[in-house]
Image (spheres, rainbow, N blue to C red):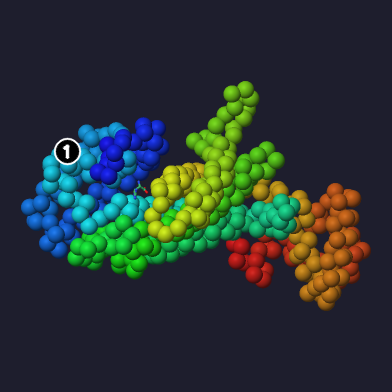
Amino acid sequence: MKLWGGRFRNEENSLMEEFNSSLEIDQRLYFEDITGSLAHVKMLVQCEILSSVEGELISDGLKGILADIESSELPIEGDYEDIHSFVEMNLIKRIGDVGKKLHTARSRNDQTAVDTRMYARKKAREMVEVLEAFKQVLKDKAEENPYIMPGYTHLQRAQVVTFKHHLMAYYQMFNRDQKRVQNALELLNENPLGCGALAGTTHSIDRMITTQELGFTKPVDNFMDGVSERDYVLELTSDFSIIMMHLSRMSEELILWCSQEFKFIEIDDAYATGSSIMPQKKNPDAAELIRGKTGKVYGALFSIFTMMKGIPLTYNKDMQEEKESFFYAIDTTLASLKIMTEMIRTLKVNEEKMRASVKQGFLNATELADYLVKAGTPFRDAHSIVGKVVIYCEDHNKGIEDLTLQELQQFSDAIQSDIYEYIDYDSILNKGTKVHLR
Ligand code: ARG
């Protein structure tokens, strides 16, 4: 069923009809589509393009459709081209010929543009909220677990950090992610409704009315831009890709940390699964899935970039294809954030195991060098002296702190008995900028 057909002599090929239909994908825009139409009708009445009786009939019809969709009385299905056609044709079915006036001074181009913007806005706001909840959980978990642990570079034990500082690093990432989405929200919140197909309309409409009605900050400045720009979709999908990248890095750490090799944490049973053959296995599937889905969100981003790159102004049908990728990115990022939030909230941290790992790997070597520098040794010389201490420790299977003062003094007579306090893993965190790790 179509909204057009007047200028066609022959029927559309059935394969083409199916190929052209986006209803399965864009049906989720039903709320935005009907809300946009209600605002449009209100404006048409206020501008005296429709009578108030006509406006009321159309608005009541639209509200009825909305209620029936939400109560599942009216399933969104059938051979409609898209959600816009579905709503309009159902309206005409319900209220008769007056329904045919809804589309006055409007095109599906500005209609789909306004629907998509409103949906993007709604989901971006939800993303900001979900990020806020996640940040709170990260902060709480960090505060509860101020324990020392090895910090890594190149995945080699490097220096002492705390679990708290490690988690708060992610807090900073997700805090910036949240700001990025908020920035995107500010930029996208302009109203494309009223741009018409691409060149406005000969009707004297008032775009400020729909702008206010739909909660936009202003109407878009340029009609051709308004109907054909999707950079906000790209911007949000980029933001979601960055969120997924951060989640994926975090997932990778959780996967490592819950392995037998690390055993720093235990993931709650609710976010793990077993093996069909190996009875002892508890696999961190939730984290692995997030890591895996990250690639698919990047794929969504690149499919939209590629789809947009050759499109001349203004609307071209290619743009219908962006929605599937955009929706995938939205759904996956929201779900991944929610799963990660719960995974972190229920996570158990193994303080003992982290402390034991700190003891292996010479995580106080830099501090021994700092000590020598304070005693007057140039840093480069101190670095080389400590290197030799480390070889000695490896040969004797000892930590630096296990060496006797005599052993240590073989390497430098600047070393005194206060060295043990200086390189103690806990007291390291009382010195210099390291207090910030606590
Ligand atoms: N379903 C279409 C889309 O999402 C609606 C716009 C159709 N416009 C047109 N000129 N055929 O892009």
Query: Which quarter of the figure has residue 73?
Result: top left
Q: Residue furthest right?
A: 410
- Left or right of 123 on screen, residue 43: left
Question: Residue 80 versus residue 73: which sits nearer the camera?
Answer: 80
Residue 325: x and y, percent? 46, 46
| Res 366 visible | yes
Residue at (51, 43) in percent of width and height:
343
Figure check: 372 above or below 170? below
Q: Residue furthest top?
A: 277
Q: Residue furthest left?
A: 53
Residue at (83, 66) in percent of width and height:
383
Position of the C terminus, as image quadrant, is: bottom right
Label 1 crowd (10 A; few <14 / some 14-19 / many >=20): few
Query: Which quarter of the figure has residue 266?
Result: top right
Position of the N terminus, as image quadrant, is: top left
| Residue labelled with disc 1 | 93
Query: Which quarter of the figure has residue 219?
Result: bottom left
- Left or right of 121 on screen, residue 338: right
Question: Residue 399 versus residue 101: which sits nearer the camera?
Answer: 101
Residue 356: x and y, percent? 70, 48
Residue 25: x and y, percent? 38, 41
Figure check: 181 above or below 371? above
Which amino acid is tagged 1? Lys
| Res 267 visible | no
Residue at (78, 61) in percent of width and height:
365
Residue 182: x and y, percent? 42, 62
Residue at (92, 63) in percent of width and height:
410
